[in-house]
Amino acid sequence: MPTPNPGRAPGLLELFERRRLNAALGWAFVGVLLVSGAVAVASGRPLWAGFTVALVALAVAPAVGLRRVDAMVPWEVLALASVPALGRLLVIGQTVGGVTLTGRITTYVAVAAAALIIAVELDVFTPVRMTHSFAVLFVVVATVATAGLWAEARWLSDTLLGTAILLDGRPEHVVETALMWDFVAATVAGAVAGVVFEYYFRRFADVTPRYPTEHATGEEVRD
């Protein structure tokens, strides 16, 4: 990844502005996620609230770890993660062509966004570097793995807490079929997120100047 030239004052000013803008937008979307989580708690949806809190934790991990408020993942990733949260708030129960907007679509956009946040943080804030094909595969596998944890969380909630999220009275084969479609949806969402990660964040968007962090070379981009 290219690094800014420390000898040019205009470049330093631009660097600072890009960091500040990215951080401001990133924290704004963290606020959206927090509001969504609070609404989920108030409306009796503890699992979605917990998932939202997990997204927030992933988003703020670099800032906490580096102790810098401007160490944020690209705001575009958090915007993508906020789409399902806003969907849960604004279009809950709405359907298009018989497909519930707050069902598989928003859920697995959020799951793919979580995997995308992990991939971007590994690529930017750690020495880890992935080949092009492995980067896409990593996001797909991370999305499907997150979908599996989400399925387990719903089953445990129904079993231990008496909810009816997954085990809602439908025949067993119907529940199993629905789970398989969930994993299909997660795989498709993961593939799309993987392509977005590789071709946007790693090839198109110049994200390096947004971060005050040490890169794999050990050099630090300073103000």
Image: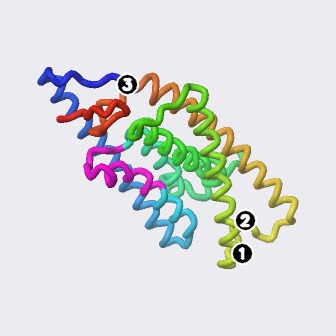
Please count the marks in the image: 3
Residue 156: x and y, percent? 68, 70
As drawn, is 15 to the left or to the right of 191?
left
Looking at the picture, tell me which residue is in the foreground, 91 or 68. 68
Residue on which disc 2 sits:
166
Q: Which residues are magenta?
A: 55-72
Residue at the spot x=32%, y=54% of the render? 64
Residue 174 in picture, x, y percent from top left: 84, 59
Q: Earlier in the sequence, mark 3 or mark 2?
A: 3
Q: How busy is the neighbourhood of tag 1: few (under 14 within 10 Å), some, or many (20 plus)?
A: few
Q: Residue at x 49, y 45 (%)?
A: 118
Q: Secondary structure at mark 3?
A: loop
Question: Mark 3 belongs to which amino acid?
Answer: Met
Is residue 67 shown in magenta? yes
Q: Which mark is residue 71?
A: none
User: What type is the residue that disc 1 sits on?
Assistant: Thr
Q: Which residue is mark 1?
A: 159
Q: Nearer the viewer, mark 1 or mark 3?
A: 3
**Residue 68: where, in percent of width, then height?**
25, 49
Amino acid type, callout 2: Leu
